[in-house]
Image (cartoon, rainbow, N blue to C red):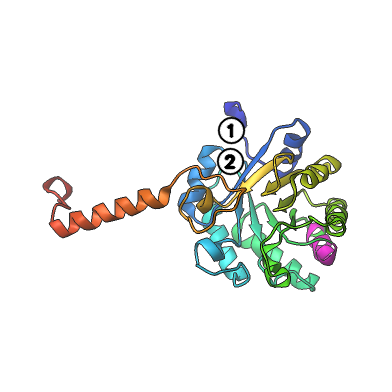
Amino acid sequence: MSTEGMLRPVTTLRLTEMKQRGEKISMLTAYDYSMAKILDHAGIDVILVGDSAANVVAGYETTVPMTLDKMIYHAQSVTRAVERALVVVDMPFGTYQGNWKEALSSAVRIMKETEAEAVKLEGGREILESVDRIISAGIPVMGHLGLTPQSIHKYGTYAVRAKEEHEAKKLIEDARLLEQAGCFGIVLEKIPAQLAGRVARELTIPVIGIGAGRYVDGQVLVAHDMLGINNDFSPRFLRRYANLAEIMANAFSSYVQDVKSGSFPSEDEQY
């Protein structure tokens, strides 16, 4: 990628252009200023302020407890740091399902209070009215199909979705509906690679995968997972690029030892 390409802000239109020329899209999560700044400087295309903060930041077992106020707080922290990447904010459970007026109000709050560029919603036909209303208000929407973590209590498992023909057919139909509604992109989570590739080929908008194989237009992972900060989660699709849990634990242990022994601070580290 050229220096100009690294500096030019990423927009929803630019993501479509990337798909058209076959350039893969990189996407990771961030929930705070410091992490977002590092990600942005590294050249990431899209930063997702994910409701996965409920898991890796707050320690909940699911994403369901995440609130709108908490998502706005995390998104505000991220957007203060970002100069280039497109920032997408997850709309949390209960802010858009079944009530388009609440959905629109929630999306407007996110955009006004965080200065992010887009929101992401989980689901297909069942949330289409909310998607329509939000897009009609001029707010870019990213869809999310396949494994939808906010619906985990409905499915009762984090197993691969859309392996059966009827569910695969519905996923394809939902993807088309989201594109027709005006979504600028779709995340496909934990579905068979061939199915994800078919969706990516049939849609003109970018398809980003997480556990959806290599035949899509880009990839997204939870930063805490790929950095090895969270080692309790090890699905097949996760590639760890570091083991920061071990590095951090060693650093903390060394600090404790230095404080206990009196070697920190030294003469050179005081005024």
Mark 2 Cα-neighbour bin, 10 Å: few <14, some 14–19, many ≥20? some
- Disc 2 marks which amino acid? Ile
- Residue located at (83% from left, 43% from top): 198
The answer to which quarter of the image holds residue 6 is top right
What amino acid is at disc 1? Met
Q: Is residue 80 visible?
A: no
- The N terminus - image quarter: top right
**Point 69% across, 72% down: residue:** 153
Q: Give 164 or 55, whichever is nearer the viewer.
A: 164
Q: Which residue lies furthest to the top in this view?
A: 2
Q: Nearer the viewer, residue 99 or 171?
A: 171
Tell whether 180 sits left or right of 252: right
105 vs 19, nearest the viewer: 19
> Magenta stretch?
125-135
Residue 145 belongs to magenta span: no
Residue matched to label 2: 44
Query: Which residue matches tag 1?
Result: 6
Q: Residue at x 59, y 53 (%)?
A: 235
